[in-house]
Image (cartoon, rainbow, N blue to C red):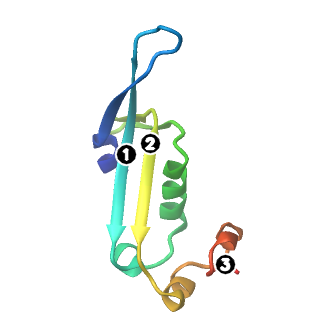
Amino acid sequence: MIDALSKNKRSVMMPGEKGEPPTPFEYNSMYITADELTAFMHSYGEEAIGTMSTYYDPQPYGQTRRTDGLNIKIKSPQLNLIVGTTLPISSTTCPKWPGNKGSAHGS
């Protein structure tokens, strides 16, 4: 997921303020769509959910590794996940946790 997101770089020109010229704004954006939640995520994985949550709030992301020369820097990542599911499947796939309070599953 990280590799795919780092390859999806976009750039838009933002209007300048008070007569300043427009400036480029770069971000990395990716949409994941799945007809069924379990087709995308067979079981709840805290690491995968944590990674997706990190990309939902577009804070800078970086990952480096000396052994294989990995150096990923994403200034403004954005991940959108659109999946379909049913309440019985979501209640068995995703455990109840405080973050689910806004959904029908977490109530």
106 is higher (above) or lower (below) than 28: below
Height in image: 104 above or below 28?
below
State the residue at coordinates (46%, 8%): 20
Q: Earlier along the polypeptide chain: callout 1 or callout 2?
A: 1
Q: Which of these two is toward me, 45 or 58?
A: 58
Q: Amino acid at mark 3?
A: Gly
Kindly identify which residue carries mark 1: 29
Question: Whole-percent x and y of residue 5?
Answer: 34, 47
Q: Secondary structure at mark 2?
A: strand
Give the SS element for disc 1: strand
- Residue type at mark 1 is Ser
The reply to whether dot 1 and dot 2 touch (C-beta < 8 Å) is yes
Callout 2: 10 Å neighbours few (<14), some, many (20+)? many
Percent of width and height locating residue 107: 70, 81
Instruction: Say whether residue 13 is left or right of residue 102.
Output: left
Q: Residue 79 or 96: which is nearer the viewer?
A: 79
Question: Disc 2 to disc 3, how far (Cα)?
Answer: 27 Å
Q: CA distance from mark 1 to mark 3?
A: 28 Å
**Looking at the image, is mark 1 or mark 3 earlier in the sequence?**
1
Residue ID at (49%, 88%): 89
How would you rate the neighbour count of disc 3 (Cα within 10 Å): few for under 14, some for 14-19, many for 20 or more? some
What residue sits right under mark 2 in the picture?
77
Q: Is residue 59 above or below residue 103?
A: above
Q: Residue at x 45, y 32 (%)?
A: 75
Q: Amino acid at mark 2?
A: Pro
- Mark 2 or mark 3, earlier in chain: 2
Where is mark 3, residue-wise? 106
